[in-house]
Amino acid sequence: MENLTPRKIVEELDKYIIGQASAKRAVAIALRNRYRRQQLPEEIREEVLPKNILMIGPTGVGKTEIARRLARLADAPFIKVEATKFTEVGYVGRDVDSIIRDLVDIAIRMVKTERMATVYSRAEAAVEDRILDILAPLPTREVNVNPFAALFGNIGLNREDDSHYEEKRSRVERERESLRWKLRAGELEDMIIEVQVEDSSPPMLEVFSGSGVEEMGINLQDVFGNIFPKRQKKRKVPIREARKILAQEEAQKLIDMDEAVTEAIRRVEQSGIVFIDEIDKIAGKDHSSGGPDVSREGVQRDILPIVEGSTVMTKHGPVKTDHILFIAAGAFHVSKPSDLIPELQGRFPIRVELESLDKDDFKRILTEPRNALIKQYTALLATDGVTVEFDETGIDEIAEIADLVNQQTENIGARRLHTILEKVLEDLSFEAPDVSGRRVVITRDYVKSKLVDIVKNRDLSRYIL
C-alpha cells in the first residue's frame, strides 16, 4: 500500500476501465486514506472513519467494475450485494447482517489460500509418502493374541518372528525407494490409485424459518460437525490428480485455522469493502400504501447501523463494522439520492456521478483495456485455429451501432457491446471448429451484413440487441 499513491491507483484502474475519472479519483483517495490511517498513532486511528461513497450513474458504465478492481488492487476482502435482495427484519428474505457474515467467510478463504500456498512445499513432501503408503504399504508386525493372554500376561502371545519381519520390511523399503524415483521422474502419473479423503458435507437437514435462516443453517452445520466423526470417502484417481487432493489435505493440516480466522476478521474490520448495488431501488417516500414496497425504508434502517458502525455476531466471533468501506451505487432514474432516509444519506458523504458512454468510449472499451472484448473473442476463436482480426472500420461500426441502439431503446451502457459482438460473431463461433486455419477480418461491411436487418427494424432490435 505504501507505493499505491492515488495517482498510481487511478493508473491501475485505467488499465481496465475507460473514462469515469471523477469516480476513480474518489475511490483512489478513499483507498489511500486507509493507508494513511494505519500510520496514525493508535489513540487517533480509531477516530478516523472511512468516507463512504455513493456512485450515481446508469447501468453498464463501470460502477461495479471500479469497486471490484479497487478491492483486487488492495488485496482486500470484497463483497458485492444487491440491496433489493434484503428485507426488513420480520419479512421473509435475507437479513442485512448476512452481508458481514458472508464477507468474513470470503476473508477466511483468502487467508487460508495464502497460508496454504506458503506451506505447499512442505505438504508436497508429505504427499509423496502418502502415495507410497498406498502403492507399497510398510508391513506391520503380526501379533496373534490368545484369549487367555489378558489373564496371564504374555502367555499365549505369539509374535511374528523378528528375522522374518525385518526381511519383509527391508524388501518393501527397497520397493518403495524404487517407486519414489519413478514418482519423482513422473513415470507413474497416469496410474490409478485409491485415495481416502474427508467427506466434509454435513448431514442434510432442511430448515424453514423467517429471518436469519442463513445463520441457523451455519449453526446446524457446526453442531453436526462436532457430533458426528468426520467421514472418509474413497476416490479412484490418477496419481497426478491424487497429488493435488492430498496436497490440499496436508497443507490444511499445517496451517493454524484459529490464527487464520483471527487474521481474516482483522482484515474485514480494517480493510473490508462492501459494494451495495441497486440502492436506488430501496429509496422511496410513500410507504403507507403497503404492497411490495412496504419494507424499503425498513431495509435502509437495517443497513444504517452496519454503515454507521456496529458489532455483528458471526459464527467466528463478533465483527466490528466501523472501518469497513461501503460503496453504494444506483442509477437513480426514478428516485433521487435525497429519497434515501436522511441518516443513510449522511453516511455516504462522497457523491460521484458517472457519465453515460458514447461512441468514442465504446471504441476505447473494445480495444484499450487489458481485458478488452476484442482481445477476449480473438483469443477464444484462436483455440479453434481461427484467426480473427478487427479492422478499424469494423470497430467503428460496432461502436456506432451500440450507441444508436442505446439511444433508441434502453441505455444499458457497455453491456450492449457484449450483445452486439455475440450477434456479429455468432455464425463464426458456430463454424470455427470446421474451418480451422481460416483468417477472418471483421470490417464495416461484415458487421453490417450481420446486423443490418436488426438495426433497421427498431422493434426487432429491442428483443435481440
Image: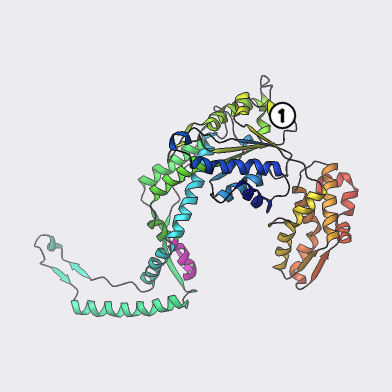
Image position of 308 with respect to 10: above or below: above
Quadrant for residue 458, please give it.
top right
Which residue is rendered at x = 46% and y = 41% of the image? Answer: 218
- Report if residue 419 lies within the magenta region: no
- Amino acid type shown at disc 1: Lys
Nearer to us in this view, 459 or 21:
21
Residue position for label 1: 336
Where does the image place residue 109, in percent across and percent down from the top left?
Answer: 49, 50
Q: Is residue 236 visible?
A: no
Which residue is rendered at x = 83% and y = 60% of the image? Answer: 392
Where does the image place residue 4, in percent across and percent down from the top left?
Answer: 58, 50
Which residue is rendered at x = 23% and y = 71% of the image? Answer: 142
Image position of 235 with respect to 172: above or below: above
Where does the image place residue 157, in percent across and percent down from the top left?
Answer: 14, 68
Tag 1, which secondary structure?
loop
**Residues in magenta?**
234-247
- Report if residue 240 lies within the magenta region: yes
